[in-house]
Amino acid sequence: MGKREHILVPKPRSAFMLVRCSNCNAERVVYSHSSMSIRCRQCNALLVENTGGKAVIHAVEVNRFV
Ligand SMILES: [Zn+2]
């Protein structure tokens, strides 16, 4: 076995995503690395939670725009 090549796949670090609220099914475009928590406009459920670093998506991801 030869040496392992270190391949870095260029991944977009951030993206806009269309998410659907799992509570009321309202769709909303959010930023995946938002520095703020984002709540559903209709039912106020937490869609994106900022944890200080990476945002945690609580909603259902419908589409992603890179
Ligand atoms: Zn909602």
Image (tube, rainbow, N blue to C red):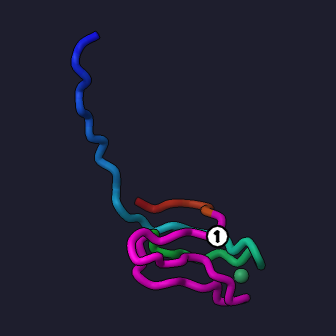
Mark 1 Cα within 10 Å, few/some/many (few <14, many 20+)?
many
| Residue 6 to residue 50: above or below | above
**Secondary structure under the numbered disc 1 in the rendered image:** loop
Task: Where is residue 32? Give x, y as percent.
Answer: 46, 69
Left or right of residue 1: residue 48: right
Q: Which quadrant of the frame does ligand 1 lie within?
A: bottom right
- Above/below status of 8 relative to 15: above
Q: Is residue 62 left or right of residue 10?
A: right
Which residue is drawn at the image coordinates 34% and 60% (left, top)?
13
Q: Nearer the viewer, residue 39 or 27?
A: 39
What is the magenta range? 33-60
Assess whether residue 22 is covered by the magenta stretch.
no
**Quadrant housing the C terminus:** bottom left
Q: Number of callouts in the render?
A: 1
User: Quarter-wise, where is residue 23 in the image?
Assistant: bottom right
**Kind of residue indicated by mark 1:** Ala
Side (left or right) of 57 relative to 13 = right
- Residue on which the image places disc 1: 59
Please provide percent x and percent y for residue 11: 34, 51
Examine the structure image and report whether residue 41 is included in the region drawn in magenta. yes
Q: Work out which quarter of the rendered image holds the N terminus and state it.
A: top left
Q: Position of residue 49 (x, y in %)?
A: 53, 77
Label 1, ligand 1: CB separation under 8 Å:
no
Look at the magenta stretch and give its main secondary structure: loop
Quadrant in the rendering for residue 31: bottom left
